[in-house]
Amino acid sequence: MSPPTLVSGPHAHSMSTVSRAMLLVSLALTPATALGCYLFGWPAIFLFAITIGTAVGAEALCLRLARRPPARFLLDGSAVLSGWLVALSLPPWAPWWIGVLGGAIAMVVGKHVFGGLGQNLFNPAMVARIMLLISFPVQMTAYVAPAPLGAPGAPGFLDGLAITFGLGGGATGGFDAVSSASVLGHLSTELGRGASLEAIRASGAGLVELSLGTVAGSLGETSAALLLLGGLLLLVFGVINWRIPVSVLGTTAALATLFHAIDPSRYPDAAFHLVSGALMLCAFFIATDYVTSPVAPLGELIYGAGIGALVYIIRTWGAFPEGVGFAVLLMNACTPLIDHLIRPRIFGRSRRGKPLTLPAAGDSP
């Protein structure tokens, strides 16, 4: 009697791969990143390249130490994307060593300490962002007003090198920079001094400026409109689904609308929160990370709502004007619990995991 033939179960095939997903996310980030590099000039371009280069180098070193083939794993694009997101979370004129530390922390501490791609508990870019913010608050909050490439008074190529590498002395390499607080930082400071919300908006923090990105802030806080466009492209191509972005933005908007109705002179409306800071970047590009977000549809909604609520709470009552990084890391820590409590139903089993019983022959279904 011949032995039974083993036949594998059915599998769903698709064109989705890690490399394809990383490439599409990078392409979706390109318009907003290009605008940010244009608005903040050569120093932002140099810092962007340094951060990504360090992330790729740290990834290669970790793979070598783990005795994995670097050439194979580097091609998936995850290191480039992580370094990209770290760069977007930095002040555009930050010194070179901030970019080096950010790229290295993201890869070593945020990713490979947990075992590499697919095993990290926390979003690597947000790990780097928060560690740098807590360790170097002065450098991480030193923002400048936009100085577009080629504009009168904007730093040229050599000036950009001096600013990034501090060749002329000082934090900006001796270049006469126009320092400015981020929009959320300015809002928090002025409200604390008793200024009205209308006066703050009249100073240049209007919805048009926030949507177009012509305000001071991190490189990824440039254009909410272009980030929204990139996020919609990810939805169209099926890289992400709607649940996390909608729950993040919807929860933040709902809380902002509620408190704005209670006291319009103290709490900005929903539109201001949606287009300011890194909320758009978070909703479409950070919170939707496959590895650190829940797998069940209901779990994704709870996860996104938690991020949106924490962002609003930290922005409104916290010590830091922006709460995206803290909110993402806190909800990353809750992801295993959400996955444990809210499990998707396994085919052939109930939601409690018990096998489904088939009706006997002749019984009505």
Image (spheres, rainbow, N blue to C red):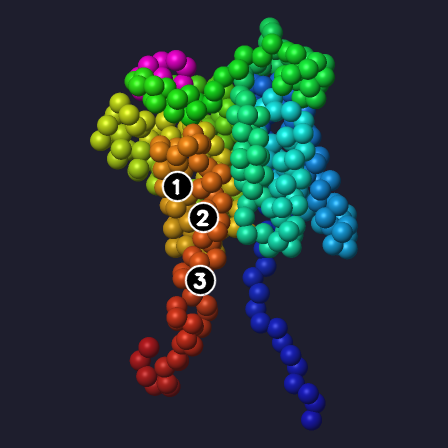
| Residue 29 can be seen in this image | no
- Between 286 and 61, the one lying in front of the other is 61
Q: Residue at x 50, y 20 (%)?
A: 216
* Left or right of 207 in this view: 261: left
Q: Secondary structure at mark 2?
A: helix
Label 2 sits on what residue type? Met
Label 1, on which residue? 310
The answer to whether residue 54 is left or right of residue 33 is right
* Residue at 68% from the left image edge and 24% from the top image edge: 46
| Quarter of the image where one finds residue 2 | bottom right
Q: Is residue 161 visible?
A: yes
Is 202 a magenta residue?
A: yes
Residues rendered magenta in the picture: 197-205
Q: To which residue does mark 2 refer?
A: 331
Quadrant assignment, res 269: top left
Q: Nearer the viewer, residue 177 or 76?
A: 177
Q: Which one is in front, 358 or 52?
A: 52
- Label 2 vs 3, first from the N-terminus: 2
Asked if residue 316 is positioned above or below residue 301 in the image, the reply reads above
The CA span between labels 1 and 2 is 9 Å
Query: From the viewer's perspective, is residue 152 above or below residue 246?
Result: above
* Label 1: which secondary element: helix
The first of marks 3 and 1 along the sequence is: 1
Q: Main secondary structure of the magenta part?
A: helix
Q: Mark 1–mark 2 contact, CB under 8 Å? A: yes
Tell me which numbered mark, 1 or 2, is placed earlier along the sequence.
1
Q: Quadrant of the C terminus?
A: bottom left
Q: Is residue 317 above or below residue 327?
A: above
Amino acid at the residue labelled 3:
His
Question: For residue 340, which numbered disc appears in the image?
Answer: 3
Report the number of discs: 3
Query: Label 1 is placed on what type of residue?
Result: Leu
